[in-house]
Amino acid sequence: MADRNIALATARMAADVFETSRAMERIEQDGYTRIDPFRVAAGAGVSVLLRPMEKLLGAFIRDDNPGILVNSARSAGLIHMTCAHELGHFFMGHENALDETVDYGSKAEIQEQEAEWFGYHLLVPRSLLSIICRRKGWNKTSLQNPHILYQLSLRLGVSYSAAAWSLIRHDILTYDAVQRLLKVTPASIKQSLLQADLPDATKDVWLFEVSDQSSVLEPRPDDHLVVRLKSHASAGYLWLADSVEEVKAQGFVLAPLAAAAGDPKMLSFGAETTMDYVLTSSAEDCSVPCPIALSEVRPWIGKEDGDANFKSKAHFEPIAEGLSRESKQVLMREVMAS
């Protein structure tokens, strides 16, 4: 565990960054669920370049025009945490840094401990944990479920392990509880959600539920999206897009999860069960959130007043080689203003 002075100093700096960058506004006002380190960097005048690398996770260069280099060949959660770590070097006044890890521990150099703690303070503040748990109806007991911890990590935009360690840092879970959680691999959780072998274990599996209707979730375009909704299939109801044309225009294809659709145990006369649907995205425009609007209808009758509906949003985050989307936007504004 880091020195208390380091924890306090980095917490104060992260709080200042929150205030100046207005990072919480998109969460509190617009329904997002994570702090975006790329947006924070762009607002502070720090360019972020992504490129695949063999060993390095990231690097910070302090120059007249400071910059951050992030390994784009890693998972989205690790990419976000790496960017936040390098921002720690920037905001804590450090010189150039090369990082092969972002979890250094208490025996590392002071500047690496500061960058590590700043990264956690930035991406997983206690106030954000409270907001997400309140929206989802999760409590301390819920967070000891590895499936819930995995979905929490996606909403925070950090890795499964980083989310687990954050719960220790905030004194929410014990060390032993987190060790039990870490024995469960994200790959096994993903496979359980899809009920099939994963075609690509690096892609995440997001679970959309009714409790996500007030949120804007931010998967990568090629992540897997599973929508879990109450089902009244025994009464002839099916969940369908409000219109086929609309859902295609929004870049989605909706289909019952194959394993769930064929499982007779999912259907019981007169009972209220749930049904999982796979939402496949082919959206090319990632600049704005894509609405997801579904209704539970009897197909031979069509949509009627009083039919159940589900509405949420997915704002896809493309993470590709080159300047981050936010750095590109800053550059374009500078060019247009010149």
Image (cartoon, grey):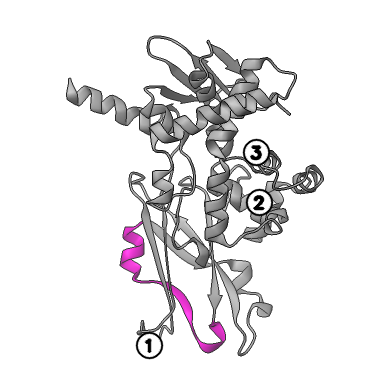
| Element type at mark 3 | helix
| Element type at mark 1 | loop
Pointer 1: what residue? 301
Q: Is residue 215 left or right of residue 204?
A: left
Pointer 2: what residue? 149
Whether residue 137 is situated above or below residue 20 in the rendered picture: below
| Element type at mark 2 | helix
| Place of residue 254 in the rendered image (x, y in percent of width and height, measured from the top left) | 46, 65
Quarter of the figure with residue 75: top right
Q: Residue at x 66, y 51 (%)?
A: 149
Q: Nearer the viewer, mark 2 or mark 1?
A: 2
Q: Which residues are magenta?
A: 232-250
Disc 2 + disc 3, Cβ < 8 Å: no
Residue 245 belongs to magenta span: yes
N-terminal label among 3 and 1: 3
Q: Residue at x 63, y 28 (%)?
A: 7
N-terminal label among 2 and 3: 2
Q: Which mark is residue 162?
A: 3
N-terminal label among 2 and 1: 2
Q: CA distance from mark 2 to mark 3?
A: 10 Å
| Place of residue 92 in the rendered image (x, y in percent of width and height, measured from the top left) | 52, 19
Quarter of the figure with residue 142: bottom right
Q: Is residue 295 left or right of residue 193?
A: left
Q: Is residue 268 visible?
A: yes
